[in-house]
Structure formats: structure tokens, C-alpha cells
Image: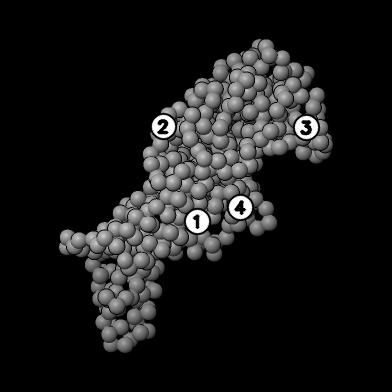
Amino acid sequence: MADSKLNLYNTLSRKKEIFAPLENNLVKMYSCGPTVYNFAHIGNLRCYIFVDTLKRTLLFNKLRLKHVMNITDVGHLTSDADTGEDKMEKGAKRENKTVWQIAESYTVAFKDDIHKLNIIDPDIWCKATDHIKQQIDWIKKLEKAGYTYAVQDDGLYFDTSKFKDYGKLARLRKEGLKAGARIDLGGKKHKTDFALWKFSPKDEKRQMEWPSPWGVGFPGWHIECSAMATKYLGEQFDIHCGGIDHIPVHHTNEIAQTEAITHKHWVNFWMHCEFLKFGAGKMAKSGESFITLKTLTDKGYDPLDYRYFCLNTHYRVPITFSYDALDGARSAYSSLRQKVIELKEISEDGSVTSADAIVAAQKYDRSFSEAVNDDLNIPKALGILWTMVKDKDIVTKDKLNLILKFDEVLGLDLKKAEKGTIDLDVESLIAQREKARKSKNFKLADEIRDKLAKQGIILEDSSDGVRWRKNR
């Protein structure tokens, strides 16, 4: 385990707390996954990079992990107020496909995105539609305990007035909430009540609907997470995470419908990632702000350029996206990869590391651990890494070992950084450019350099001669 204690910010207490798992050395963690009606945009993906960084930090601290992530393929309506169209049905109409085809297609696309971002898969993927029985069983328990009521031609609702601590995560005051455009009471008793089971429209057959004790319909969005999290992680577990938009509604409702049955403190740590902003607002799934990972790769960016971009900002601080900022991240990440390549090529011929060099390396190791264990302070950790890289007192083998160790948290896949090979034509052009430089024909030298750059070969002049690297 790292030398320093792991401190994590808990949304529930609004402060950093020393983290220790409930069960020996095993961390049980649930993270809210995607609603698979469209591609994930890069704002969504920022949250999964955060979850992956958290996961890597736990592993870095020699903790074992059981990580569960849901796939929402039913029940998420276009309004958090339980009105509007099911997002999955809307996606199916948009593309003239079945809901099942939409769910499968965008689940595959999401998994492909996270793999490109070097995000570690959860131990358990769980789809809402595979757990309808568990959700119905949970709603039955809530009904038996007196927490539900039916709204005619609409659905079965959770009565939040009967749960004493409702809103504790978001610090909501139920009596202070006012109806408005965002909250339509309809037949609900209270503004904060939420759907557990929605009835299918009488004049329309949905593609996803199931029989239940209350009528044919489909589960509300929130119930899936309670049913699946408790199935795989038990009635109490360590960490639940997601985006900050989950705090006031989704996660608040999860707590109410779960603790109403278990009568136990459900989750020890609630952790949330801030928004990625585009211009004046948050990124959305429409208009010019709908930027996907494919948007970036089509423009020539490596997915890990975007990961590096996200790591530059603390997960609890909003990021404003721009291509200029992404260019800066790409340049820094490329330089780091190149440094790894150079270190791999240097031979120290069995030279002995001095005592001072050992102490210096240990200091960087300790400082990095302290940074990541301070609520995932990855921007500070990156700064420590770069200072270490430039420190001439650290010998090559220690420098390389530390970079690769730090990358266990950063997830930048630096161990795969290789110079690669170039064909004979490129070698010939590099030789021609060197000849032009030596004869002071700088115009020709620049032309050859620019030509190679368009082919993805970047030349860097140094006191030791010209070096080349591929711009991935």
C-alpha cells in the first residue's frame, strides 16, 4: 500500500474522509453507466475516466476491487420529472430500428470508446432489462412497507414524504421546493415523488414492456440501480459514483428506495465528477456541442490525448473544452511518450545507482502517492511526474520505472510507447534533410521536414543529431 492514507471527498458529508473498505481489503464499488440510446459524448466519457482513475488509485493502494456498472436500456425518460418519452424508444424512432437493436448497438459503441481510452472494464456489467424480476421484487417490498401509491394511467410512485431522510445527499429541503417548468406534479402527491413502475399507454404497445402486479409497463429509471447494486454488492457497500447531475434526483432517489427497505446506511462514499463544458454550457447530445470520441479521432487525435486532457483538471472542477486545449494535451502526451522511448533506448551498462539518486527517486515516489491519495489530485501528480522526468539526479532505469509505476494510476498506456520502424523512403528523406542542413540549405531542409510531418513523422533536432518519432 502507498505510504500515505487514501483520502476521498464524500458528497454525502461534503468533506474529505479517510477511506477504508467495509470488508477487509475488498472495495465494493458501483458506478452509473450509460443510457444506451446514442453515442456517449466526451463529457460523458470524462466521468468514466474519473471512475477509472479512482479504480486505478484503489488498486495502486493494493486494495482488491469488485466493480459493478449498469447499462440503462429502459426506463430513462427525457425528463427527470418522470414525464416525456423513454429515451430508448425515442432513439429507436430516430433510427428506424428496434429498441433492442439500438441498445445493443450503442452498448457496443460505448464499450469500444472506453477501451480506446484505456479504461478498465468493470467486473460486472448489468443491464436493466436483464433484471426486471429483481426490480419488480424490490417495488413489491416498497409497496408492502407502505411507501407507494398509484397514479391512474401513469404509474406506481414512491411517496417521499414517508422517508424521513429524503434529499440528504443533495441537501434538499422538500418543503422549499416549488413547482415550475421542470417539475410537473401531474397526479403526484408531492413534487419530489418519483416513478417506480410506469404503465404502458393504453393506445400504444411499447417495444419494451413487461407484466407486473400493477399492470403492463416498464420500470422507472432509478429502481434498476437499487435492485442491481444490492444483488451484486449487498445491502451495504463502499463507493457509488457518477456525474454531479445524478446528485439531486437519481442518486437521491436511489438512497430513498434502498434505505427504506434495508434500514441501513447504504453507501459509505458518494463520489461525483464535474461537467465538461463547451462554450457557455455543459456538453449535450445535440448541436455543435455533441462531440464524440470519433469526432476527435476523425480529426487526428489519439483517444489518449483526450484522457491526458481530462487528467490535467481535478475531477471536482469543471473543464471547458477547446481544441486549443486539446492540442496542448496532445503535445504534452506526445512528449511524455517520446521520453519513455528515449529512456528505453539508453543503456547504462550496469552502472551502480548512487545513494543520493535512490533517495531522490524514493522522494518522487512518495510525493506522487501523496498527491493521488489526496482525493485523486492527478494534476499535481502529473506535475510531480514531469519534475522527476527533468531531474538529472535520477538515473535512467529509476526514471523509467517510476514513469511506468505512476502510469498504473494515469492509465496512459506508456509501457507500449515504442519508436516503431520507418520505411527506406523515409530514411532516405531524413538523410537528405541532414545533408541539406549541413550544407546550410535550410529551405530544402524545412520542406523535407514539413513533407515528413504530413506523413506523421516528426523530426526533432538535438545536439546528438536528428531524432524522429511517429505522431501516432
| Label 1 – label 4 distance at C-alpha | 13 Å
**Residue type at mark 4?**
Pro
Residue type indicated by callout 1: Pro
Q: How far, Cα to Cα, is label 2 from label 3?
A: 38 Å
Q: Which residue is mark 3?
A: 174
Dot 4 surroundings within 10 Å: few (below 14), some, or many (20 or more)?
Answer: some
Q: Is residue 84 visible?
A: no
Q: Which residue is mark 1?
A: 379
Please state which of the two labelled residues, at mark 2 or mark 3, is closer to the viewer.
2
Is disc 2 surrounded by few (<14), some (14 to 19) or many (20+) residues within 10 Å?
few
Residue that label 4 marks:
318
- Label 1: few (<14), some (14–19) or many (≥20) C-alpha neighbours in 10 Å: some
Find the distance from the CA under tag 2 to the CA under tag 1. Answer: 27 Å
Q: Secondary structure at mark 2?
A: loop
> Which x, y percent locates residue 257?
65, 24
Observer-side mark, 2 or 1, equals 2
Q: Write down the residue under mark 2.
A: 25
x, y percentage for residue 133?
56, 17
Near-viewer residue (351 or 252): 351
Q: Residue at x 40, y 68 (%)?
A: 454
Q: Nearer the viewer, mark 4 or mark 3?
A: 3
What amino acid type should be assigned to the residue bearing mark 3?
Lys
Q: Tell which circle, 2 or 3, labels the residue nearer the N-terminal end.
A: 2
Q: Tag 2 or tag 4, which sits nearer the N-term?
A: 2
